Amino acid sequence: MSTTESNKAVVRDFIDGLFTKGDSGAVEAYLAEDFINHDPPFGVTPDREGMRAAGDQMRAAFPDWHSELHALVAEGDIVVERFTAAGTHEGEVMGAGPTGKTVSLPGINIFRLRDGRIVERWGRLDELGFLQQLGVAPA
């Protein structure tokens, strides 16, 4: 398997593990110790523990949270993921009590890998649309 394909597999397995399966052990398995999240979502810290907190937060509020991969493109040590995550709102998140509604969160992530581990992430998520679906931001 080429390095490019191997890097894509790491990203796919990390996202599937942390966000679809709810396995917080994916943080140790796939993120380098010096991992930096340049765009941490929802106010989490920009390190491995912040990424774990983001996964745990989504799993607690949306027990069926899952990520649907639309595109995965790689060149060299960079992997770009376009996705839509979704789940049924059954727990409190960002000040919003459970609504029972299915909400979605589209986004794009850019990962940089080194020696088979993710060392950096940049991303853009539709956080405003997400908050609007939860009813905590005006439509």
Image (cartoon, rainbow, N blue to C red):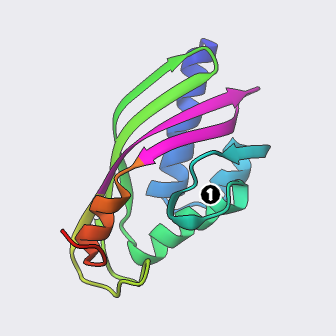
Mark 1 lies on a secondary structure that is helix
Residue 4 in the figure: left or right of residue 28: left
Q: Quadrant of residue 72?
A: top left
Which residue does the image show at 67% across and 29% down from the upper left? 113
> Which residue, as the protein is rendered here, is positioned at the far left?
139
Residue 77 in the figure: left or right of residue 15: right
> Which residue, as the protein is rendered here, is positioned at the far right?
33
Task: Count neighbours of disc 1 (C-alpha within 10 A) and say few if under 14, some if 14 to 19, many if 20 or more.
Answer: many
Q: Where does residue 91 sit, x and y in percent of width and height? A: 39, 83
For the C terminus, which image quadrant? Answer: bottom left
Residue 109 in the figure: left or right of residue 120: left
For disc 1, the marked residue is 51
Magenta-colored span: 105-124
Classified by dominant secondary structure, the portion drawn in magenta counts as strand
Q: Quadrant of residue 56?
A: bottom right
Picture layout, residue 132 above or below residue 17: below
